[in-house]
Image (tube, rainbow, N blue to C red):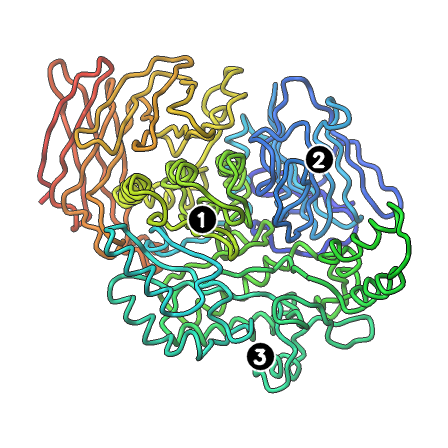
Amino acid sequence: MGTYKLKNDIKVFKYGNPIETGAVVEEKIKAELENNLDIKFEKGHCKISIKLSSKDMVYGLGGNLGGINKRGRLYESYCIDEPLHIEDRTKLYAAHNFFIISGEKSTGYFIDFPTRIKYDVGYYNENCFNIEICGKDFYLYIIEGKDAKDISNKFLHIIGRSYIPPKWAFGYFQSRWGYRNKEEVKKVYHIFREKDIPLEGIYLDLDYMDDFKDFSISEERFSDLKGFASDLKKDGLYLVPIIDAGVKVEEGYDIYEEGIEGDHFCKDKYGKPYEGVVWPGKVHFPDFMKEETQDWFGSKYKVLTDCGIEGVWNDMNEPAIFYEQEALDEAIQYAEESKGKNLNVFSYFKLKDNFTNLANKDSYYESFYHEIDGKKFSNDEVHNLYGYYMTKSANLGLTKLLRDKRFLLISRASSIGMHRYGGIWTGDNSSWWSHLEQNINMLPSLNMCGFFYIGADTGGFGGNCNGELLTRWLQLSVFTPLLRNHSAVGCNNQEPYVFTEEVLVNSRNLIKARYSLIPYIYSEYMKSVMDYTLMFKPLSFEFGESLAKEIDDQVLLGDQLMIAPVCKPNRRGRYVYFPEKMLEISFLDEDMPTSIKEKGIQYIEYGLEDFKFFIRKNSMIPYVKPSKNVKELDQQNLKVLAYVDDEAVYNLYDDDGQSYDFIEGKNYSTEIKIIKKTDDYEIIVENDNPSIKNISFKIIDSKNNTTHKEISTC
């Protein structure tokens, strides 16, 4: 065992010869440290046991099911294509191995290991957190701090700054697997404009490809994609196409032939390119562990950027495998042998399971290999890095191709380290109320693991969404950096205009509210990323009382807001816990009525036609008039809604929204200070943003008295 520390005295323990995943960017310094954890090695696996007191909360583990507090559940860190997120699922698309145990004291843990880890978070024994690392070569980071928030900030520092998209990536996006051709996409675009619904872009699923082949465009369905994308971009609308991990095996297909010639594909045990089966049939998987393959695959995005594309989503990169030919042949053989037989319950279920369990078998990932620094590793040994390095490949390619221009990039599979190269959506959720609630649970957990450009498929991907669920989901998604309404072929459409007129009006108003709040959301995103702080926090990170620790359907956004969406059907409101006095805002009403809410639990009326959130004391929210897209967002007349008891300060961050100049400090700051006097307010504004000319204020004090002021910043 080797022992190290980082500059901020984080302890690092090295066991065996770990694969360098690139998750941590801070340099390790040799040290002699003692680890008091109960660690045992058995048959090549490592088992760690941590005692839990009754007061301990367990935070983190990123994109997993369960509440903000992860106690009482089983988890398995092994990226998998799992479209059915039912209650007892232990693994999904992500492998985020950072967690915090917080009670009488707080300690953070990060297990830097590229494959399977099993977590029993007090499931079988409520007093024990048992971890099984399926290997013996790993780094273990132990982070001490004054509290959970302090620990999360330290962890964000050591893993490096999160990916930063362009400002247009904060707009509203419509998507569907099933927009079959250019005409259907045009129709969606035209209806959004006709109905006066803001729209930033449309995601293109597999439909745009030629026979599901990466970096191909169907001439039959999407001819002249370059001209089409150019026409839409003139109106400020972006196309965001999908790219899958598997490359079709087909003679004459340039990507396939280049991959073979350049030795870019993963190998089977015989040293031949491994064959799995996904959308196009037989595919090879690029070996993204090799830098030359990252460069090669990344360069292929030129097919899209040459068409004017500035955003991409990587999918199926766990990697998903529908079946291997040998496994399918065995299933078919058993079925043929079963023909005409009197099958009992066991033989019948074996017949059925042979087909229903074909996808993503563990044996598949043991049967193909990567090359890392000249050494061969099975995919199973580095499984959780695949989506990470595919997205790194895309990032490297798009950075070279688009040069000084930021791009939108999201991935389905991820592990810590990938957060520096792209954002994520939370995968193939369903149109279930429980998944709306799960969405809010995941926000702080993902932030703790470095992922900031995040969001769920609003309305749900699978299943049939109704107008009530879509509206309630939008009331939450207005705040998430990634706002995409995405649905699956075979399910009902869920564009805002396919429901009743009431749903259309409510959805339109909510999406407009999103555009009004983009200056604030973008500011909070950028400050969180640049300062290594959480954008979304559990209530317990700010408020220590026991009730705050139990609440996981409310979260804090930055230091100003509390969000409490309605996550149950047929409700006209909900009970909200106020850990301190706050100001309730009904944002959609023209006069924006407010109400002071005292500390405690109160029932809040919250209709489908409304949009509510809560401002903390001595805080303010900047906003602007809505627009149809980010391109036309006008910050000339900034508005500020403030709740001031004595003094409030807010710094509105902004930049050009498209270049990397912000890295060199080229950005704009509008610092606003409101000081309560005996009978009035003093407002001090230091502004270097030339786009802001006037600021109008609505200031509410602790007695719900309202003051209106307007100043010029010219």
Q: Residues within 10 Å of mark 1 (few under 14, many from 20)?
A: many
Tell me if residue 355 comes above or below residue 46 in the rendering: below
| Numbered disc 2: secondary structure | strand
| Numbered disc 1: secondary structure | loop
Separation (CA) of disc 3 from disc 2 = 41 Å
Q: Which mark is residue 137?
A: none
Amino acid on which the number 1 mark rests in the picture: Tyr
- Image check: 707 left or right of 339? left
Amino acid on which the number 2 mark rests in the picture: Leu
First reached walking from the N terminus: tag 2 or tag 1: 2
User: Which circle, 2 or 1, is nearer the viewer?
Assistant: 2
First reached walking from the N terminus: tag 3 or tag 2: 2
- Residue designated by label 1: 453
Residue under the point 83% across and 45% down: 45
Residue 439 position in % (x across, y down): 50, 38
Separation (CA) of disc 2 from disc 1 = 27 Å
In the image, farthest residue toward the bottom: 252
- Image check: 481 left or right of 141? left
Residue 519 visible in image = no
- Image check: 164 left or right of 675? right
Residue under the point 51% across and 66% down: 206
- Residue designated by label 3: 255
Residue 480 position in % (x across, y down): 41, 42
- Residue designated by label 2: 74
